[in-house]
Image: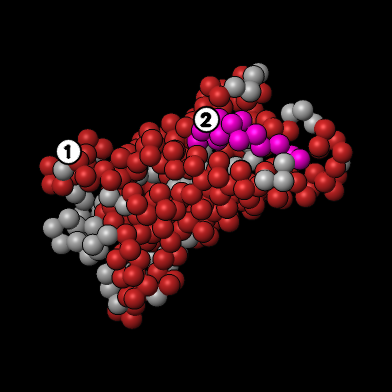
């Protein structure tokens, strides 16, 4: 139960820190290459704040916040149970357990990110006063999509989400396991928290780099049809058209803001989760916690990459 609560708190901290970067990433990924609104990451930040105020950077945050509890519960539950089934705490098993968790949580992640993307694209490039709001909030967004397109519409981008999340979570847990072992993260280490923050931040960067091109396609498919007109018939059609119009660099659009976001998001998640669990364990059984030989394995399950 405490792992569940800690995961929710850590995930919430990660979303609050990283959502502005995610908004910029999505705007850059889906903007028209022939008539770009933004020159780059920092110009995008400046434009959103100038045209839509600081709150423009937090458009669509309701969706990831709503899905946070369910996603964290699924990830921690599946990852922990898979590790127990596999029997040994090895880097390979950490990858497999993370991949399993990434696959299962897509059921919540895909609709959540669809609503987030649609909300982030609402009012793009318009002055705040003249912006026409199609969706009131994330729930209204999903409800309207369901009315128009049914279950298939709500799950738009599910295949690309699966292709992205499965290996991304595997890479995340693998890199985290390797880094925490290399850095020697132990409960009695006075530098444990900075080490966990560093390991979490670097793991987040590694997981994004491993699947970023797929994320670009996912964003484009989920943003497709916002104006009532669909450009892509599927994953391959989107990939082909994107390559033909913009070249291979299309798969790196928004990467800078994504990597800038990845480190603080995962560092914040690790710090929040770890501090909460340390406090709870100290209150319940401080001596047992410090003497537990499995404590290192427990630390490896205290954080996850936030989404996305």
The residue that appears at 58% across and 56% down in the rendered structure is: 13
Q: Residues within 10 Å of mark 1 (few under 14, many from 20)?
A: few
Left or right of residue 198: residue 148: left
Question: Which quadrant does the N terminus fall into?
Answer: top right
Per the model, the C-alpha gap separating discs 1 and 2 is 32 Å
The residue at the far bottom in this view is 129
Closer to the camera, 175 or 17?
Answer: 175
Q: Residues within 10 Å of mark 2 (few under 14, many from 20)?
A: many
The residue that appears at 64% across and 19% down in the rendered structure is: 88
Q: Is residue 179 magenta?
A: yes
Left or right of residue 22: residue 191: right
Give the residue at mark 1: 240
Q: Mark 1 against mark 2, which lies toward the viewer?
A: 2
**Helix, strand, or loop for circle 2?**
helix
* Quarter of the rendering containing residue 60: bottom left
The residue that appears at 28% across and 45% down in the rendered structure is: 252
Residue 130 on image: x %, y % = 29, 79
Q: Magenta-highlighted stretch: main secondary structure?
A: helix
Q: Note whether 135 is above or below 240 in the view shown.
A: below
| Colouring rule applied to residues | secondary structure
**Helix, strand, or loop for circle 1?**
helix
Residue 105 on image: x %, y % = 51, 38
The residue that appears at 32% across and 75% down in the rendered structure is: 51
Q: Note whether 99 is above or below 219 in the view shown.
A: above
Closer to the chain start, of discs 1 and 2, is 2
Bounds of the magenta segment: 172-188
Q: Is residue 123 magenta?
A: no
Q: Note whether 28 is above or below 221 in the view shown.
A: below
Q: Is residue 145 visible?
A: no
Give the residue at mark 2: 174
Residue 234 on image: x %, y % = 24, 39
Closer to the camera, 259 or 110?
Answer: 259
């Amino acid at each position: 139960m405490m792992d569940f609560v800690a995961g929710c708190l850590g995930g919430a901290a990660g979303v609050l820190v990283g959502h502005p970067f995610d908004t910029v990433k999505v705007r850059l990924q889906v903007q028209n290459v022939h008539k770009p609104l933004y020159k780059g990451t920092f110009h995008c930040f400046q434009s959103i704040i100038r045209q839509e105020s600081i709150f423009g950077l937090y458009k669509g945050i309701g969706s990831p916040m709503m899905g946070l509890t369910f996603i964290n519960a699924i990830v921690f539950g599946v990852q922990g149970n898979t590790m127990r089934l596999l029997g040994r705490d090895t880097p390979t098993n950490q990858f497999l357990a993370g991949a399993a968790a990434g696959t299962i949580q897509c059921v919540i992640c895909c609709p959540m990110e669809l609503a987030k993307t649609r909300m982030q694209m609402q009012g793009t490039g318009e002055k705040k006063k003249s912006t026409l709001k199609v969706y009131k909030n994330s729930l209204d967004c999903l409800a309207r999509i369901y009315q128009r397109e049914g279950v298939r519409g709500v799950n738009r981008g599910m295949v690309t989400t699966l292709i992205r999340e499965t290996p991304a979570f595997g890479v995340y847990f693998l890199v985290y396991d390797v880094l925490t072992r290399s850095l020697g993260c132990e409960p009695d280490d006075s530098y444990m928290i900075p080490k966990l923050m560093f390991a979490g931040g670097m793991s987040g960067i590694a997981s994004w780099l491993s699947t970023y091109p797929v994320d670009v396609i996912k964003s484009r498919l989920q943003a497709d049809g916002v104006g009532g007109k669909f450009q892509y018939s599927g994953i391959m059609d989107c990939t082909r058209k994107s390559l033909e119009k913009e070249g291979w660099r299309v798969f790196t659009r928004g990467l800078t803001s994504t990597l800038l976001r990845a480190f603080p998001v995962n560092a914040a998640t690790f710090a929040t989760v770890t501090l909460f669990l340390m406090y709870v364990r100290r209150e319940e059984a401080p001596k047992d916690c410090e003497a537990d030989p499995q404590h290192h394995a427990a630390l490896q399950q205290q954080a996850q990459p936030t989404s996305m």
